[in-house]
Amino acid sequence: MNVLSIDFGDARIGLAHATTDVKLALPLRVLQNTPQVWKDIQDILQEYDIDYILVGLPINLDSQDTIQTQKVRTFVEILKEKFTGTIELLDERMTSVMASRYLEKGQSIDVESARILLEEWLEKKINL
């Protein structure tokens, strides 16, 4: 199964991908969050033959929704109109903090956050 992980942001959207056969989360790219993003996402879905999408859901430390949580939910509703496969929302509370620790010079925190989200998901799936 080919999986795409999305770290949604107002300005940028980080992407990572993996195949469950290899179980290795790889950074993909950053997209600018403009109207063009939907065409870019469609192109990626086709190019990587994506079956499954993970989207990070920003929930605060008290497990409450934030303004950004609603933006992500709106993004996912539009994504559901464009993608017929499974879309799963995952708690991303600490991914940005973890990503900032692992970043090397020139890397995108958005892509690294998407990669970490995917890596954690793969680890859970492997252990099931």
Image (tube, grey):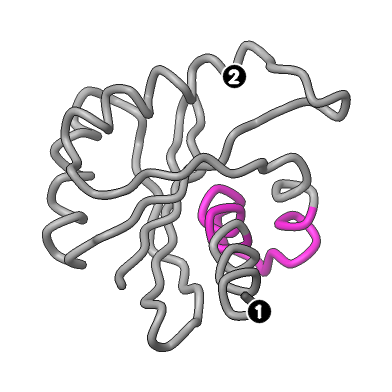
| In the rendered image, the vertical position of residue 47 relative to residue 72, given as above or below | below
Q: Residue at x 37, y 44 (%)?
A: 87
Question: Residue 76: x and y, percent?
Answer: 37, 29
Magenta segment:
98-116
Q: In x, y percent, where is residue 46?
A: 12, 58
The spot of residue 80 in percent (x, y) is 26, 32
Q: What is the crowding at mark 1: few (fewer than 14 residues within 10 Å), some, or many (at least 20)?
A: few
Residue 21 falls left or right of residue 108: left
Camera-nearest label, 1 or 2: 1
Name the mark on residue 127.
1
**Residue 100, above or below 104:** above
Quarter of the image with the N terminus in it: bottom left
Residue under circle 2? 68
Q: For numbered disc 2, what is the local secondary structure?
A: helix
Q: Is residue 84 magenta?
A: no
- Assign a secondary structure to mark 1: loop
